[in-house]
Image (cartoon, helix red, strand yellow):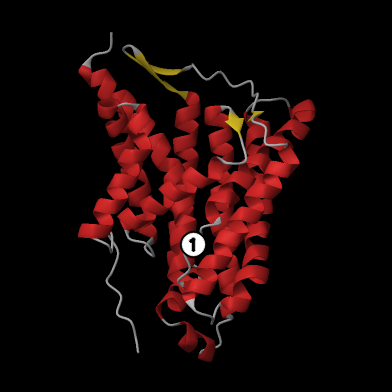
């Protein structure tokens, strides 16, 4: 029998793990929106592709490097690069020709790209669940009374923390990060100042897609399976996290992801797991009604 304190600790850890997934994916949403004002609804499917890429590369590496953490990390790095390239190509051929078109055109294109990725992976995998059979013991870790915080959970939290710190440094300290922030404020002026806007937008898509790939491989390791439809719900929840934090705000995406994970874990404990999606999207509706700019977002003024 678990005590109240143990239940709180367990649900907090569960919420933080969920929040890590949401934060990594929502960063892609918020970075892209901040620069090109696009709600990239294909981003959840890039997460799904990253999970499959990690799964297949892990399977290829297993005979050489085993089925432990080394193969998992190598598969994660490979998935980051390949999904980063995928994100760049999507931006180059699907979105760049429409940057000056009405926003609705971009939105419809994003939905189309999402359907293409989803159905392509369904065909390639015959619509089957694939099981991620690694040798890392999912039950060992740090024991706290009757509960255990597993090493898998701790590693996933550590990887997420490192990536969030690295992204913050990149955006605030590097010339490319400063260019991203400048473009998000005034794209036409940046062109006049000699900034290669298309290159910076491509880098933004690369980074966002790479982070989604990390979340996909982490989900493989944590849940033990992958399927072609996994990107839809996760993408919508990551979008919810971006709205909660303030879409367009990178700190907001981090905060919104972790907060949504914790709230969903608490809601699951109180209402039951069958209500978790209702609870998450209920939060989205409440935020859009009472604070549409999010916790850290800023009110935008449309220029005529």
For mark 1, does the 10 Å Cα neighbourhood hold few (<14), some (14 to 19), or many (20 or more) residues?
some
Judged left or right of residue 3, residue 30 is: right
Say if residue 38 shows up in the picture. Answer: yes
Asked which quadrant contains residue 18, the reply is top left
Q: Position of residue 19 (x, y in %)?
A: 39, 41
Q: Position of residue 72 (x, y in %)?
A: 64, 34
Question: Foreground residue, 109 or 145?
Answer: 109
Identify the residue at horizontal 38%, vertical 55% (top origin).
Answer: 242
Identify the residue at horizontal 52%, vertical 91% (top origin).
Answer: 192
Judged left or right of residue 2, residue 99 is: right
Identify the residue at horizontal 62%, vertical 29% (top origin).
Answer: 69
Q: Which residue is mark 1?
A: 170
Local SS, label 1 = helix
Q: Quadrant of the N terminus?
A: top left
Depicted 219 relative to depicted 141: above or below: below
Q: Position of residue 11 (x, y in %)?
A: 32, 27
Q: Quadrant of the C terminus?
A: bottom left
Q: How many marks?
A: 1
Judged left or right of residue 66, residue 51 is: left
Say if residue 180 shows up in the picture. Answer: no
Q: Position of residue 49 (x, y in %)?
A: 64, 46
Asked which quadrant contains residue 216, the reply is top right
Identify the residue at horizontal 55%, vertical 40% (top origin).
Answer: 230
Depicted 168 relative to depicted 197: above or below: above
């Amino acid at each position: 029998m678990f005590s109240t304190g143990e239940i709180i600790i367990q649900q907090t850890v569960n919420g933080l793990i969920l929040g890590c997934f949401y934060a990594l994916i929502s960063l892609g949403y918020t970075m892209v929106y901040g620069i090109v004002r696009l709600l990239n609804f294909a981003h959840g499917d890039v997460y799904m592709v990253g999970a499959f890429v990690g799964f297949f590369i892990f399977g290829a590496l297993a005979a050489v490097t085993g089925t432990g953490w080394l193969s998992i990390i190598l598969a994660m790095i490979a998935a980051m690069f390949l999904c980063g390239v995928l994100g760049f190509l999507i931006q180059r051929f699907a979105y760049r020709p429409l940057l000056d078109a009405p926003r609705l055109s971009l939105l419809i294109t994003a939905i189309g790209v999402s359907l293409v990725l989803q159905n392509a992976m369904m065909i390639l995998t015959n619509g089957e669940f694939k099981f991620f059979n690694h040798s890392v013991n999912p039950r060992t870790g740090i024991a706290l009374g009757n509960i255990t915080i597993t090493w898998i959970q701790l590693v996933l939290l550590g990887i997420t923390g490192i990536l969030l710190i690295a992204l913050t440094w990149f955006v605030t300290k590097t010339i490319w990060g400063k260019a991203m922030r400048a473009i998000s404020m005034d794209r036409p002026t940046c062109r006049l100042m000699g900034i290669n806007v298309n290159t910076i937008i491509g880098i933004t898509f690369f980074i966002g897609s790479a982070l989604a790939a990390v979340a996909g491989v982490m989900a493989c390791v944590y849940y033990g399976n992958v399927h072609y439809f996994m990107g839809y719900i996760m993408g919508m929840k990551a979008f919810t996290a971006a709205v909660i934090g303030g879409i367009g705000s990178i700190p907001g995406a981090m905060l919104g992801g972790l907060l949504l994970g914790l709230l969903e874990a608490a809601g699951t404990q109180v209402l039951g797991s069958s209500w978790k999606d209702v609870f998450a999207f209920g939060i989205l509706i409440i935020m859009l009604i009472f604070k549409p700019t999010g916790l850290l977002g800023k009110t935008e003024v449309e220029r005529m």
